[in-house]
Image (cartoon, rainbow, N blue to C red):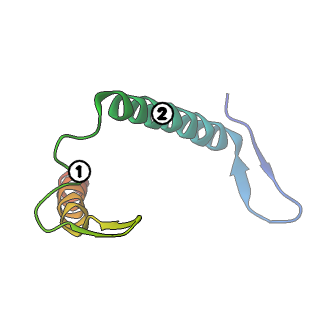
């Protein structure tokens, strides 16, 4: 059942069904993120991802600076390719 109303403060029609669908989507995405995070945590990571040649690691004394530049570029390329494929 889809209900709608017109707000007095904002003269636009708001559909309550869309708002509840968005809430359900956010809850499902949150659960998926928790499950994926738990799997990655329990299995020890994503294989060699994050330790690719070209990733920057600097250790001096008790400090370590780590910047996975190549991993970021690889993930960006893969996600861009997926977004391009799903847009078609």
Q: Is residue 44 left or right of residue 88?
A: right
Which quadrant does the N terminus fall into? Answer: top right
Q: Tell me which residue sits at (65%, 37%) in the image.
A: 20
Question: Few, some or many C-alpha atoms within 10 Å of disc 2 (few <14, some 14-19, many ≥20)?
Answer: few
> Residue 75 location, x and y as percent?
23, 58
Q: Tell me which residue sits at (43%, 29%) in the image.
A: 35
Q: Tell me which residue sits at (45%, 37%) in the image.
A: 33
Q: Of the residues under marks 2 and 1, which one precedes in the sequence?
A: 2
How many marks on residues?
2
Seen from the viewer's position, the closer of residues 77 and 46 is: 46
Question: Few, some or many C-alpha atoms within 10 Å of disc 1 (few <14, some 14-19, many ≥20)?
Answer: few
According to the image, label 2 marks what residue? 34
- Nearest to viewer (mark 2 / mark 1): 2
> Residue 11 location, x and y as percent?
79, 65
> Residue 56 location, x and y as percent?
23, 70
Q: Is residue 5 left or right of residue 17?
A: right
Element type where label 1 sits in the image: helix
Which quadrant does the C terminus fall into? Answer: bottom left
- Residue 24, picture quadrant: top right
According to the image, label 1 marks what residue? 86
């Amino acid at each position: 059942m889809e209900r709608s109303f017109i707000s007095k403060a904002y003269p636009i029609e708001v559909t309550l069904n869309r708002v509840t669908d968005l809430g359900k989507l956010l809850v499902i995405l949150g659960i998926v993120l928790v499950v994926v995070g738990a799997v990655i945590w329990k299995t020890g990571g994503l294989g060699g991802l994050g330790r690719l040649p070209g990733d920057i690691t600097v250790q001096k004394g008790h400090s370590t600076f780590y910047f996975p530049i190549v991993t970021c570029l690889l993930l960006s390329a893969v996600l861009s390719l997926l977004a391009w494929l799903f847009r078609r």
